[in-house]
């Protein structure tokens, strides 16, 4: 009997499925979203990536704003354990995509990664336990006795250096990161984005700690399910990248779920690679969204997928020398309708109390006037949310959309 041919999806249909799966296309709440609404969104996405760059806004705050509109950031802080306020632990930090916030019940799904530190972690984090086992043990003891602690507190792990013996803060930081990666300590909270470490037993609820450790294969299958649901329709590399699974494991788990009919093979017009559809994915016939997207938003963080899905070539240029940047330092794509229509280089000038538009660039084939008007409205909204008094487009702003944007904003 011939195998049934995969269903074929147009690129536009795939794009709408992907946007809906990522939480776009529904009207933003009229009232500021509640803690429960914020939590529900994070569970839908599965992960919020963290990043230290704060030239515009902390990366993990933006995906919630992009989908739900203005919200009280302290509500996200509360469920993530950030800041010095009340904690209602619903999210925890771990290396999920990169450094990320995930729902607490997902923490056991990464125990295979914690156990496989030699393959999964970068060099110094995996090496230190072999090179400095006593330092790692002493650092864990320090956390148990004094936690939560900052990395700088690890200077107390050892007495002053003996002649010929090297000790510095970096060693303590690496030891802490090893303990964090292997799950022996956890991020109790962040204050001014600085991570405070404590024993995992004091951070995670007992109900999570007591869960049996799943087999690595079953944990990875569940991560693939979460990723596939959050992506809607995706290739195997798209799915594997979501939680940075080793490629061989990603291929194996996707094949297993496909064989079990938990993923449906599909062909997407214009995609050379096979794709997989989450069976319960929403399939809207039309979709309208308007959002600025952080460079670390899960809709666009896998750049190959962004290009394949939106015909939008995007590279972050933070680490590119200024003279070689094409669009700017911190550039956010602008989503309008079902398409990425522009990109804008933004800076929150907190001393002046203004959101600076350092560059604004329209994509080919868009209506510049419409895009500029919608972008101006979104910029005003995000400026207000960031407690900035207004939007400024200086005369030095680059890009073909800058002048029209300046005329609207005034």
Image: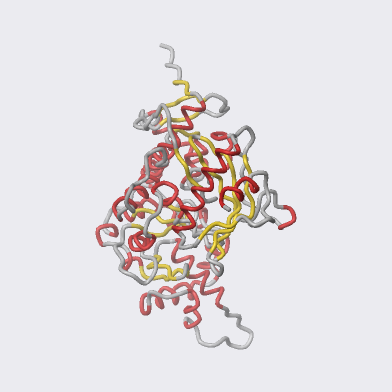
Colour pattern: secondary structure
Q: Residue furthest top?
A: 1
x and y, in percent, of residue 302 in the image: 54, 43
Q: Residue at x 37, y 32 (%)?
A: 281
Residue ranking furthest to the left: 207
Q: Is residue 260 above or below residue 405?
A: above
| In the foreground, 291 or 189 | 291
Left or right, residue 333 beside residue 256: right
Residue 85 % position (x, y): 34, 70
Q: Nearer the viewer, residue 40 or 343?
A: 343
Comparing 88 with 111, the one in front is 88
Picture coordinates of residue 56, whole percent (x, y):
54, 59
Q: Is residue 327 left or right of residue 371?
A: right
Residue 21 drawn above or below residue 172: above
Q: Is residue 279 above or below residue 90?
A: above
Horizontal side of 379 relative to 190 (left or right) equals: right
The N terminus: image quadrant: top left
Q: Residue furthest right?
A: 323
* Residue at left offset 44%, top offset 66%: 179
Up-down relation of residue 99 to residue 344 (above or below): below
Count up the numbered dots. Answer: 0
**Residue 371, image x, y percentages:** 56, 40
């Amino acid at each position: 009997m011939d195998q049934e041919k995969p269903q074929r999806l147009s690129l536009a249909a795939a794009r709408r499925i992907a946007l809906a799966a990522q939480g776009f296309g529904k009207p933003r709440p009229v009232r500021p979203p509640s803690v429960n609404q914020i939590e529900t969104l994070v569970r839908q996405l599965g992960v919020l990536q963290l990043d230290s760059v704060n030239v515009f806004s902390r990366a993990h705050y933006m995906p919630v704003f992009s989908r739900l509109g203005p919200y009280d950031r302290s509500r996200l802080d509360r469920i993530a354990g950030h800041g010095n306020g009340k904690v209602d632990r619903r999210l925890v930090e771990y290396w999920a995509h990169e450094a990320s916030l995930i729902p607490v019940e997902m923490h056991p799904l990464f125990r295979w990664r914690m156990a496989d530190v030699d393959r999964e972690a970068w060099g110094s984090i995996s090496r230190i336990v072999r090179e400095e086992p006593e330092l790692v043990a002493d650092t864990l003891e320090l956390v148990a006795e004094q936690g939560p602690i900052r990395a700088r507190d690890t200077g107390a792990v050892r007495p002053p250096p003996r002649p010929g013996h090297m000790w510095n803060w970096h060693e303590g930081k690496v030891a802490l990161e090893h303990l964090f990666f292997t799950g022996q300590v956890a991020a109790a909270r962040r204050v001014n984005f600085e991570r405070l470490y404590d024993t995992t037993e004091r951070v995670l609820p007992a109900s999570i700690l007591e869960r049996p450790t799943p087999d690595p294969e079953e944990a990875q299958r569940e991560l693939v399910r979460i990723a596939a649901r959050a992506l809607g329709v995706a290739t195997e590399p798209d799915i594997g990248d979501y939680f940075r699974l080793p490629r061989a494991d990603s291929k194996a788990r996707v094949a297993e779920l496909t064989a079990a009919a938990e993923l449906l093979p599909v062909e997407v017009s214009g995609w050379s690679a096979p794709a997989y559809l989450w069976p319960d994915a929403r399939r809207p016939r039309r979709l309208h969204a308007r959002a600025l997207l952080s460079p670390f938003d899960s809709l666009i963080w896998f750049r190959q997928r962004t290009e394949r899905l939106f015909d939008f070539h995007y590279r972050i240029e933070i680490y590119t020398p200024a003279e070689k940047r094409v669009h700017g330092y911190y550039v956010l794509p602008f989503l309008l309708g079902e398409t990425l229509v522009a990109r804008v280089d933004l800076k929150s000038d907190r001393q002046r109390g203004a959101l600076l538009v350092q560059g604004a660039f329209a994509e080919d084939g868009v209506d510049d006037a419409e895009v500029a008007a919608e972008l101006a409205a979104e910029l005003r909204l995000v400026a207000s949310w960031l407690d900035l008094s207004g939007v400024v487009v200086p005369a030095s702003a680059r890009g073909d959309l800058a002048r029209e944007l300046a005329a609207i904003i005034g």
